[in-house]
Amino acid sequence: MTARIDHLVTSGTFSLDGGTWDVDNNVWIVGDGAEAVVIDAAHDADAIYEALDGRTLRAIICTHAHNDHIDAAPALASRTGARIHLHPDDLPLWKQTHPDTPPDVELMDGQVLTIAGVDLTVLHTPGHAPGAVCLYAPDLGTVFTGDTLFRGGPGATGRSFSDFPTIIASIRDRLLTLPPDTVVRTGHGEATTIGEEAPHLPEWLSR
């Protein structure tokens, strides 16, 4: 079976540093008709489960541990038996949301996860969060960037655990080196491409 990417938008709240905001999150499902992985189990475990449409869920992959990207992960894991994957540098953030339910598997830079014959390479891209990762799928011509890179610029760095120079270095060194036609599938909002975003690096550096 041929691998495909399914897209689901779920709605909820993001909370950090004493503030709470309403947000819409992109949930990405990569797989074929038999098996899949979920990238960022946000807000609504039931909706994500329904979108799987009977497929075996092999893994729940977290691009980072802000609560809006992980709040539905334990419930989805409990329902499907899938293991939750998170970079260890984001454990302090994870524990703010799920203090009694640790993730199952540590994501490491350069690690390759394979689903439906497609490789997802883990790129550690700190800045928005210490353990933020992107998942590069060259066979699908795409990279899943979580909140590291959006259409129009880098993810936010104005809150705890974030750092602007670090996210710029991650984008410059890990993402803008990918082929220009690589589709950037983000944690919120519309997709873009590496080629569309790369020319804007100088203006980001001047912020």
Image (spheres, rainbow, N blue to C red):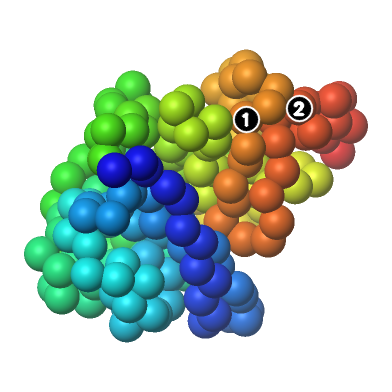
Q: Is residue 114 left or right of residue 145?
A: left
Where is residue 190 drawn, in percent x and y?
70, 56
Quadrant of image for the N terminus: top left
The residue under the point 17% across, 60% down is 56
22 to 17, vertically: above or below = below
Between 186 and 207, which is closer to the camera in this rendering?
186
- Tell me if label 1 and label 2 are in contact, CB under 8 Å: yes
Identify the residue position indicated by label 2 in the image.
195
* Extreme residue toward the front, this view: 1
Where is residue 75 drawn, in percent x and y?
22, 76
Identify the residue position indicated by label 1 in the image.
182
The residue under the point 15% across, 75% down is 79
Where is residue 176 drawn, in percent x and y?
66, 23
Kind of element beneath mark 1: loop
185 to 83, vertically: above or below = above
Kind of element beneath mark 2: helix
Q: Which amino acid type is marked by label 2?
A: Gly
Distance between the Cα atoms at labels 1 and 2? 8 Å
